[in-house]
Every structure is written in C-alpha cells, then in structure tokens.
C-alpha cells in the first residue's frame, strides 16, 4: 500500500464555491501529479511538480491551480466550482528519474451541483 | 500521435477461468509499459512494469508480455478470482522528456462472476 493520501474522498458542492483537494505523501518523492478521470475514460494529466516551488500545467487544460510549498503536500484548488468540474481527481507521486513506479492516491470524487 | 488502445473494452468471465487483455500502443520513443489494476472508486495500483528488453513479467497470477517490435502487450490472468473484478489499465511511458510522460489507455473492465 502506497503512503499517499487524498482528502476528502467524496465532495458534493454547489456551483461557485471555492474548493481545495488535499494530497499528501510520506515517501519523500520529488515528483507529484494530478490527474482527472471521467468514468470509462483514460486518466488525463492536469498538473505536475518536480519539487518544491515547481508547478506546471499538464496535457488537459484545467481551471484549477496547484501549489508545492512542501515536498509532501500538493493541494489542488478550484476558485469557482462549476458542474463541468465534476470528475474523479487522482494524485500521484514517484521518486527521481528512471523507470520508477508511480504511486496513486485513492482519489477524490467531486460532484458540483 | 502517441496513443494507447486496449481491448476488449469489457469482459465477463466465470471464477476460476483464465483471460487475456490486449494493449496496442504507438508511443515513441518507448521507455516502459505498465499494467495497473484500478478498483472502482480507488486509485490505480501497479501490477507490472516492463522495459524494452523485457518480454515477460509475472506478479502472482498476473503475467504480462511485451512485443516491442509490434508495439503490443498482453496481460494474462490465471485462475480468476472475484477480487480480480476491476479495470485494468495499460500505461506506456516515453523517454523523450524528463517528465517521463505516461500515456494511459481507457482500460478493460473485467467482471468475474461466481
């Protein structure tokens, strides 16, 4: 079992609210990722980080933002949630370079009404 | 365009039977291929990772094969159990960037019936 945690696991929220999805890992990994996954579809990379104070946008355009102030913490924020943001959000991390396993958190299922 | 295609989209088998899932990819330059198991409502968990030089790797009842020439992989599950019911995702990594970008298939949804 990987030591990567996400909270909340489920969130139902109204349109226009600001939300933050939490992701923490205790493995000391430098690289962290956020993916978005709709039912029956592939994972899409929306944000990644190489380390503290490093954040980049991924392949899928997202209105969310991320921060990396501490190695172990990589939160994702939506300033104003919309129904189109309804999805599953998965956080992942991996060590360094090379062929290393990427560990996934359990995910946050977000529903915006 | 780098893509990963999986087949079948879904599969139902009886407990105790074997099955094989397929993955074709066009990712280049190739670095490695991974198979993940994703239970409903959970994050993916790695089953195997294979590099260019490996053509088979096992993890218990799971055996993955890789043909880098034809860009195909398969995941064989032996003596299936009810707990094998999940989505199986093929993921290919390229070596053209420091990110080690991962390309995900849509998964094969496996259901094992008693």
Image (cartoon, rainbow, N blue to C red):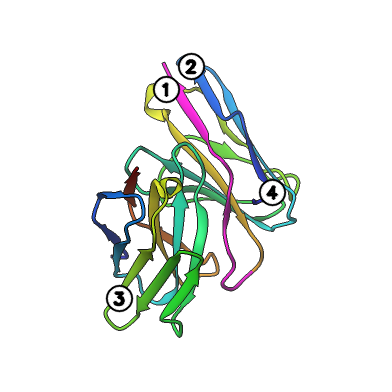
Q: Where residue A47 sits: x, y (%)?
A: 52, 47
**How many residues crowd around disc 2 within 10 Å: few (fewer than 14), some, or many (20 or more)?**
some
Q: Is residue A79 visible?
A: no
Residue under pointer 1: A82
Label 2 chain ID: A
Residue under pointer 3: B71
Respond whether the residues carrying marks 4 and 3 are from the same subunit.
no
Q: Which residues are magenta?
A: A97-113
Quick one: quadrant of the C terminus of chain B? Answer: top left
Check whether the beta carbons of the residues at disc 1 and disc 3 lie within 8 A of each other.
Answer: no
Name above or below for residue A8 compared with residue B31: above
Circle nearer the N terminus (1, 4): 4
Respond whether the residues carrying marks 1 and 3 are from the same subunit.
no
Check whether the beta carbons of the residues at disc 2 and disc 1 lie within 8 A of each other.
Answer: yes
Q: CA distance from mark 3 to mark 2?
A: 45 Å
Q: CA distance from mark 4 to mark 3?
A: 33 Å
Q: Which mark is residue A3?
A: 4
Residue under pointer 2: A16
Circle nearer the N terminus (4, 2): 4
Q: Where residue A53 sits: x, y (%)?
A: 70, 50
Circle nearer the N terminus (2, 1): 2
């Amino acid at each position: 079992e990987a030591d990567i945690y996400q909270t909340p696991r489920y969130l139902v929220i109204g349109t226009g609210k600001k939300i933050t999805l939490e992701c923490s890992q205790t493995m000391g990994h430098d690289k962290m990722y956020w993916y978005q996954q709709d039912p029956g579809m592939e994972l899409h990379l929306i944000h990644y980080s190489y380390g503290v104070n490093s954040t980049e946008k991924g392949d899928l355009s997202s209105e969310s933002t991320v921060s990396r102030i501490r190695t172990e913490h990589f939160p994702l924020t939506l300033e104003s949630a919309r129904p189109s943001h309804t999805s599953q959000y998965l956080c992942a991390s991996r060590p360094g370079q090379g062929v290393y396993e990427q560990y996934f958190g359990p995910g946050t299922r977000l529903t915006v009404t | 365009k780098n893509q990963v295609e999986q087949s079948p989209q879904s599969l139902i088998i009886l407990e105790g039977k074997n099955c094989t899932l397929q993955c074709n990819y066009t990712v280049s330059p190739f670095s490695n291929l991974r198979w993940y198991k994703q239970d409903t409502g959970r994050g993916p968990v790695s089953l195997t990772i294979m590099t260019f030089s490996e053509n088979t790797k096992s993890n218990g009842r799971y055996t993955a094969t890789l043909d880098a020439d034809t860009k195909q992989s398969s995941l064989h599950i032996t003596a299936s159990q009810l707990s094998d019911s999940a989505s199986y995702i093929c993921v290919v990594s390229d070596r053209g960037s420091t990110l080690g970008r991962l390309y995900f298939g849509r998964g094969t949804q496996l259901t094992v019936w008693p």
